[in-house]
Amino acid sequence: MTGIRNHGTKRLRAARLSPRDVAHVGASGLRSRPMRVVLSALGIAIGIATMVAVVGVSASSKAQLLERLDRLGTNMLVAAPGDPLFSGEKLKLPKDAVGRVSRIEGVEGVGATGDLERTVRRSEKIPEDETGGIGVKAATEGLLEVLRGRVASGTWFNAANARYPSVVLGHVAARRLGITAPGQQVWMDDRYFTVIGILAPLPLAPDVERAALTGWSASKALLGFDGHPTSVYERSADAAVHDVRKLLGPSISPQSPRDVKVTDPSAALQAKAATEGAFSTLLLGLGGIALLVGGVGVANTMIISVLERRYEIGLRRSLGATRGQIRIQFVTESLMLSGLGGLVGVALGAAATAAYAASGGLPWVVPLWSVTGGFGATLVIGTVAGLYPAVRAARLSPTLALHAA
């Protein structure tokens, strides 16, 4: 008798899906329902666009402030009379305060202004009490260089014109007076002064922006200026700022250093740059909520897709697809849906930031972390949103799925 060999039967194994196959089966569900895909991806896109735009607008505004700080510098200090502790008499800086400050080691430039109890008007026919918030100040020739300002039109004081009835207007003062070009005249102390220049904006010296400036010599001769500066501006080397700050008071007033108040005009801009975007946290939260709502929409779309494609799922299972393959198909589809919304959202957010920056003259800045973080969040949302529908699809019995269909 011929012996019968008992050959062991080989267990069938499902073929593994290549990444290309996974992408193909995942995209097939999206291609069959384009309108639903667009509406579901829109929720994700709105959330990501909001988050990217909020971060981009905040970063663009901060970049502008930092550029302005770099241009204006953080190495300028201002010395002014302090507040009297006991007597009601107003303190004054010495007349030679500019010379004293210029002798401090590390100081590179010094300028000063002195407040004048005068008003400036467009003509003598305007009532004296209608000042428009414009002050009158005496100014030294070195002031503009220390402030790193520039003359928008006209010229600045020099040794010649500083002795005559001439005036340089801050850009705010010029706008309030209706002066648009040098050569026009303004009325001060019962006489006309000729406007020789109009300054560009001075972010570090807002009081100068709102003032009519007269030459130091002319202020003494024509306006009764006593020669005591009200504010002394100094520009020093960056490394010497700390030491100069400690020496300003003792140098200006050796007997009473506390009578001198020293301030840093750039501190306000630095604080604003540091806190830029604090209010954006609220808007980021709203964008996060929109993103979560979009994720819920994706999950809902995937659940409906599973219910509508029960026959397809049952057929694939009967042809040998494993539960794992069914799960990865629907998770991939969810990821593609969320990723599509994420890409569109990043593009919309960047475009919104570009439009805002262009309209406000700001540098266009979209931090890389906001793009990668936002797109990464969409992938996480897509994975989470697709897990339950994928598991539900994988648990469908092939027989019941084909029978129900």
Image (spheres, rainbow, N blue to C red):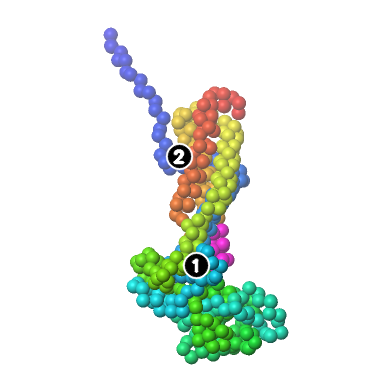
Q: Position of residue 91 (x, y in %)?
A: 51, 71
Callout 1 crowding tier (Cα within 10 Å): few <14, some 14–19, many ≥20: some
Label 2 sits on a secondary structure element that is helix
In the rendering, at what x and y percent does residue 340 appear?
A: 52, 48
SS category of the residue bearing label 1 = loop
Q: Which mark is residue 22?
A: 2
Tell me residue 251's x, y (percent): 39, 72
Task: Work out which residue is located at the far front of the displayed protein and give it.
Answer: 87
Classify 369 as above or below 73: above
Q: Amino acid at mark 2?
A: Val
Q: Is residue 238 at least partly visible in the picture?
A: no
Magenta segment includes 266: no
Q: Is residue 353 magenta?
A: yes
Q: Quadrant of the image for the N terminus?
A: top left
Q: Is residue 275 above or below residue 19?
A: below
Give the main secondary structure of the magenta stretch: helix
Q: How far separated are the C-alphas under marks 2 and 1?
A: 75 Å
Asked if labels 1 and 2 touch by Cβ distance under 8 angstroms, the answer is no
- The mark that comes first in sequence, 2 or 1, is 2
323 lies above or below 136: above
Q: What type is the residue that disc 1 sits on?
A: Gly
State the image quarter where residue 234 is shown: bottom left
* Segment colored magenta: 351-362
Q: Tell me the residue that label 1 is attached to.
A: 82
Which residue: 66% across, 83% down? 122
Quick one: 256 or 115, which is closer to the camera? Answer: 256
Q: Badge 2: few (under 14), some or many (20 or more) residues near its Cα, within 10 Å?
A: some
Q: Which is more foreground, mark 2 or mark 1? A: 1
Say which residue appears at 49% left-offset and 63% top-offset.
269
